[in-house]
Amino acid sequence: MEIKNITIIGSGALGSRIGLQAAISGYQVTFYDISETILDAAKSMLMKIGRQLVKSNKLTIESQGQALSRIHFTTDMNIALADCDFVSESVTEELSIKEKVWQQIGELAPVKTVFTTNTSYLLPSQLAALSGRPEKFCAFHFHDVFYARVVDIMPHPGTNPELIPLLQSLGRKLNQVPVLVKRESPGYIFNFMLMAVLGAAGRLKTKDVASIEDIDRSWMVNFHMPTGPFGILDNIGLDTAWHVVKERPDEASRAFAKMLKEYIDLGKLGEKSGEGFYRYPNPVYRDPEFLNS
Ligand SMILES: NC(=O)c1ccc[n+]([C@@H]2O[C@H](COP(=O)([O-])OP(=O)(O)OC[C@H]3O[C@@H](n4cnc5c(N)ncnc54)[C@H](O)[C@@H]3O)[C@@H](O)[C@H]2O)c1
């Protein structure tokens, strides 16, 4: 099948990035979210990322304008799905929200539509049946889209195998490197490894073994990385991380979830709210002196 119209359900941090890349790649993109205010924030985000891409010579001003002309916004799911070939769902990482949304999508989308979720840690089999078309349902999970360009393709046992080459091809058209997760596994490939590192960092902090800054310095210096585990958590969003960590039963995860919740309750959600473990737009770890202090 040919994909022309892509609908993004949930236009927050990741939905807006996926949709912007899809528009840059030439697709017609419709963004859906629950309020005009959130869609306005998504518009500002698209402009901001577009400017960064132009500044770093990854996009010309002309291509940015053309991409933006292919983008539409709506708070009406009927309109969002009316002629949709492909859904990429990026709503809040909460099972009950995703369940409700997939039921709605299944009721409203045309027969031709391919269904994908960008969930970070849920499994597609937890949502597929609710969509009413489990054979058309697959996880298609992005990382950061523009700088971290791996896209995980993770079918559930009922996914039609013909979807896999379609998703591999779409992934490449979206400037991503597709990787196939052969069987359902929470966290796919990279996030599974990342969770181990972030969990260890959380444990070092909640047990008061080291400061946030020294934990990040250790990682950054030894691996020549621009960001440490807590900077990465700020980038992911503390609320998104909390939704994942709070589901884990072990004591270390419970302590880490409690710590994340304390930041969230203060409105410190990470980079997107201007503050998390660090303050943005100029967090101290980007200061060259950080590694020497
Ligand atoms: N943040 C990351 O680094 C990252 C990376 C890969 C995947 N993801 C996944 O992407 C998804 C979204 O994460 P995010 O970081 O963009 O979160 P976010 O909080 O920035 O965005 C979530 C969006 O979902 C919307 N939403 C909530 N309920 C909705 C509903 N009923 N209908 C439509 N929209 C609704 C919210 O209004 C919000 O705009 C999650 O599943 C997350 O696990 C996140």
Image: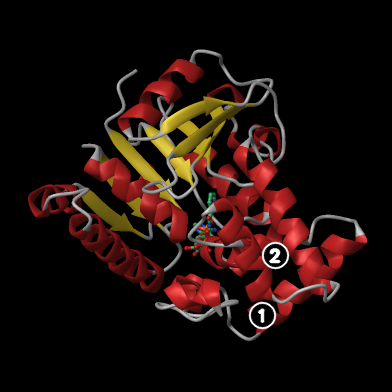
Image quadrant of residue 50? bottom left
Going by the numbered disc 2, the residue's amino acid type is: Trp
Disc ID at residue 232: none
Residue 160 image offset from top left, x and y in percent: 56, 16
Q: Earlier in the sequence, mark 2 or mark 1?
A: 2
**Residue 33 visible in the current orientation:** yes
Residue where numbered disc 1 is placed: 263
Neighbourhood count class around disc 2 (C-alpha, 10 Å): few under 14, some 14–19, many 20 upward: many
Instruction: Please state if 171 lies on the left or on the right of 259 as rendered.
Output: left
Residue where numbered disc 2 is placed: 242
Residue at (30% x, 50% y) in the render: 20
Out of 36 and 274, give the one closest to the viewer.
274
Residue 210 image offset from top left, x and y in percent: 76, 74
Residue at (49% x, 78% y) in the render: 284
Neighbourhood count class around disc 1 (C-alpha, 10 Å): few under 14, some 14–19, many 20 upward: some
Q: Is residue 223 above or below residue 125?
A: below
CB atoms of marks 2 and 1 within 8 Å: no
Residue 81 image offset from top left, x and y in percent: 38, 42
Instruction: Please state if 192 lies on the left or on the right of 226 as rendered.
Output: right
Which structural element holds mark 1?
Answer: helix
Image quadrant of residue 250? bottom right
